[in-house]
Image: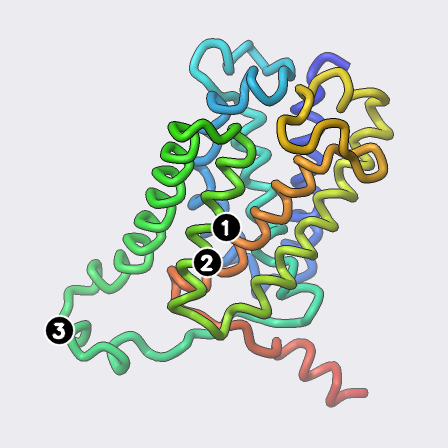
Amino acid sequence: MKHEFLLLSLLFLLPAGVIWLARPDLRSLMKRMALASTPFAATERLFYPEYWTPKFLFDLADRIGFGVEDVLFVAGLSAFSSTAYAVVFRRAPMPCSPPAAARPWLRGARPWLRAARPWLRAAAAIASALAATGALLAAGVPVLYAAVGAMMAVAAALLAARGDLLVPTVLGALLSAAVYLGLCLVFAALVPGVFARTWRPSVLLPGRALLGVPLDEILYGLGAGFAATVFPAWAFEFRYAKSARASSARRAG
């Protein structure tokens, strides 16, 4: 197949579509994460061709450093990795506390400042992750491990401020890795031999695979789930509470 990465990116959108239809209460979170993840599409220039060598639509990776596939991929990955915990454990994002009540200085702030504050927090975390990735690359860490290490380091820093998110974050990471593995297995079934043909040999995990999927990829899915579960809850100041839908169903039963 000529455009394997396009197929993989479309596969990653499937769980997002199912969650979008099944859990309307998570749509706001999914939209925020799709927007917040967009800058990471441009990091393709770090992975291609060092880590892998897929064919891009219109050869955009060779022209501008990333392609349409990258935007689709990060949107799909962010959507299911940020909601996996909430879906499986029937949780919903709930505000931690009214911002003005929790922070008196916000009472007199202009509305645009109150609205922009979560996005400023999000931008700071994203910038920190990108900077950490750059620092690890400069230190000689291979690109995939630099990316995962940066995601985990920033997420750990956020957990230091929000210890209540530790369990959701760990479970979200494991669930995301499981979904990531499942999608890669479907991908490998549709395009036999794709991992051997398109992926470079691993640096730290040479030849290691789970059901034919390189452990590098599963590690990336784990890191993405770890970061995507804690990051929006910290930036937009919500907690994971029992969803009203789950409570209603239990009462009806």
In this rendering, position of residue 39 left or right of residue 50? left
What is the CA distance from the residue labelled 2 to the residue labelled 3? Answer: 33 Å
Nearer to us in this view, 106 or 131: 131
The residue to which callout 3 is attached is: 108
Kindly report the distance in space between the C-alpha atoms of the residues bearing marks 3 and 1. Answer: 36 Å
What amino acid does circle 3 point to? Gly
Q: Which residue is mark 1?
A: 152
Q: Residue at x 63, y 54 (%)?
A: 20
Q: Secondary structure at mark 2?
A: helix
* Residue 196 falls in image quadrant: top right
Amino acid at pointer 2: Ala
Residue type (three-letter) at the residue carrying disc 1: Met
Residue at image position (49%, 10%) is 62
Residue 17: x and y, percent? 67, 47
Rendered residue at 56%/62% (across/down): 169
Task: Please name which of the two marks, 3 or 1, marks the residue nearer to the observer.
Answer: 1
Looking at the image, is mark 2 or mark 3 nearer the viewer?
2
Q: Quick one: label 3 or label 1, which is nearer the N terminus? A: 3
Task: Decide which of 142, 96 is in the foreground and name it.
Answer: 142
Q: Earlier in the sequence, mark 2 or mark 3?
A: 3
Do callouts 2 and 1 mark residues in contact (Cβ within 8 Å)?
Answer: yes
Label 3 crowd bin: few (<14), some (14–19), many (20+), radius 10 Å: few
Residue placed under numbered mark 2 in the picture? 156
- Relative to 249, 164 lies left or right: left
Which residue is found at the position 55% from the left and 10% from the top? 59
How packed mark 2 is, by other alpha carbons closer than 10 Å (few <14, some 14-19, many 20 or more), is: some
